[in-house]
Image: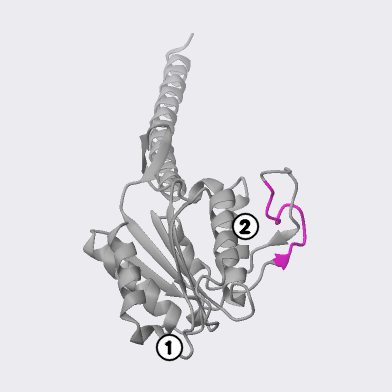
């Protein structure tokens, strides 16, 4: 073989080696970059999807921070129902709880709507079938994060016509979201609940049936434990603001959380 042919062959082999070396280097850098990118994306997804941390205690899971969420299902954020809910929260604060109150009258929360497909529907964990309803996008999102962090739930509603207010019923209906298998684990377990109702009728304990309905709903569907309830009668003629006995009872409920 001539020298020129040998040099050409060596040059070609050297070039091929250089090309393969460069390719390996680039592939290595690309692989490292992809690994880093994958790690970043995976970390972000885990952070987004990670549920609220809970410590396992006796086979159940408890929230790691003591939080009280108060819901006032009234058009008034300083009316009879709100005053009693606020007193419970105040008692909770004195007992070391973080508290938050949401008045449904200041929020735009709509009824559930018919879903356009099974995929968009809330799915029943009992029948494994779609309910045929989905969630409208509205101010419920201002409450969802608080619901998912609470350890105590204080629910107050006025009674106008023998049952919870329309706002209360719509809010409870919207909680059907947490019956869906895909998101049910977001709702905290072992939440303790307090029920407060206010009404015009002068008869004490007149709406025990409503209280019992709320108790059943919270305990059967959301696995809460109702620990206290308060019925405030005759609140039109004799408003809560003038009744130290009711305010004291509400405050003591909060102190006992």
The magenta span reads: 113-124
Q: Mark 2 highlights which residue?
A: 176
The residue labelled by disc 1 is: 238
**Residue mark closest to the camera, 1 vs 2:** 1
Q: Residue 175 location in percent, x, y?
A: 58, 60
Locate the C terminus by quadrant.
bottom left
Estimate how packed mark 1 is, as few (under 14), some (14 to 19) or many (20 or more) residues with alpha carbons within 10 Å. Answer: some
With 235 as the anchor, is 248 left or right in this view? left
Q: Which of marks 1 and 2 is nearer the N terminus?
A: 2
Real-space Cα distance between discs 1 and 2? 36 Å
Whether residue 99 appears in magenta in the rendering, the answer is: no
Residue 219 visible in this rendered orientation of the protein: yes
Specify few, some or many for label 2: CA neighbours under 10 Å numbering under 14, 14-19, or 20 or more: many
Percent coordinates x, y for residue 54 in the rendering:
37, 42
Residue plotted at (43% across, 45% down):
50
Above-or-below relation of 23 to 103? above
Q: Residue at x 59, y 51 (%)?
A: 221
Q: What element carries label 2?
A: helix
Question: In this rendering, is residue 212 above or below 163?
Answer: above
Q: Where is residue 208 in the image (x, y as percent from the top left)?
A: 55, 65
């Amino acid at each position: 073989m001539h020298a020129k042919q040998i040099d050409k062959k060596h040059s070609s082999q050297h070039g091929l080696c250089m090309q393969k070396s460069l390719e390996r280097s680039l592939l290595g850098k690309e692989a490292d970059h992809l690994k880093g990118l994958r790690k970043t994306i995976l970390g972000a997804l885990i952070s987004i999807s990670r549920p609220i941390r809970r410590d396992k205690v006796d086979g159940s899971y408890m929230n790691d921070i003591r939080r009280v969420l108060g819901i006032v299902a009234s058009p008034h954020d300083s009316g009879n129902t709100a005053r009693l809910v606020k007193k419970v929260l105040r008692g909770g604060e004195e007992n070391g709880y973080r508290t938050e109150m949401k008045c449904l009258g200041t929020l735009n929360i709509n009824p559930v709507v018919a879903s356009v497909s099974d995929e968009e529907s809330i799915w029943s964990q009992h029948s494994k079938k779609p309910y045929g309803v989905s969630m409208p996008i509205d101010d419920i999102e201002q409450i969802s994060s608080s619901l998912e962090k609470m350890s105590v739930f204080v629910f107050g509603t006025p009674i106008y016509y023998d049952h919870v207010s329309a706002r209360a019923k719509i809010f409870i209906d919207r909680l059907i979201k947490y019956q869906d298998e895909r998101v049910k684990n977001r709702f905290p377990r072992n939440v303790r609940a307090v029920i407060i109702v206010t009404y015009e009728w002068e008869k004490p304990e007149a709406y025990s049936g409503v209280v019992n309905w709320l108790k059943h709903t919270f305990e059967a569907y959301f696995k809460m434990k109702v620990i206290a309830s308060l019925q405030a009668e005759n609140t039109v003629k004799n408003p809560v603001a003038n009744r130290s006995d009711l305010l004291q009872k509400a405050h003591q409920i909060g102190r006992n959380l």
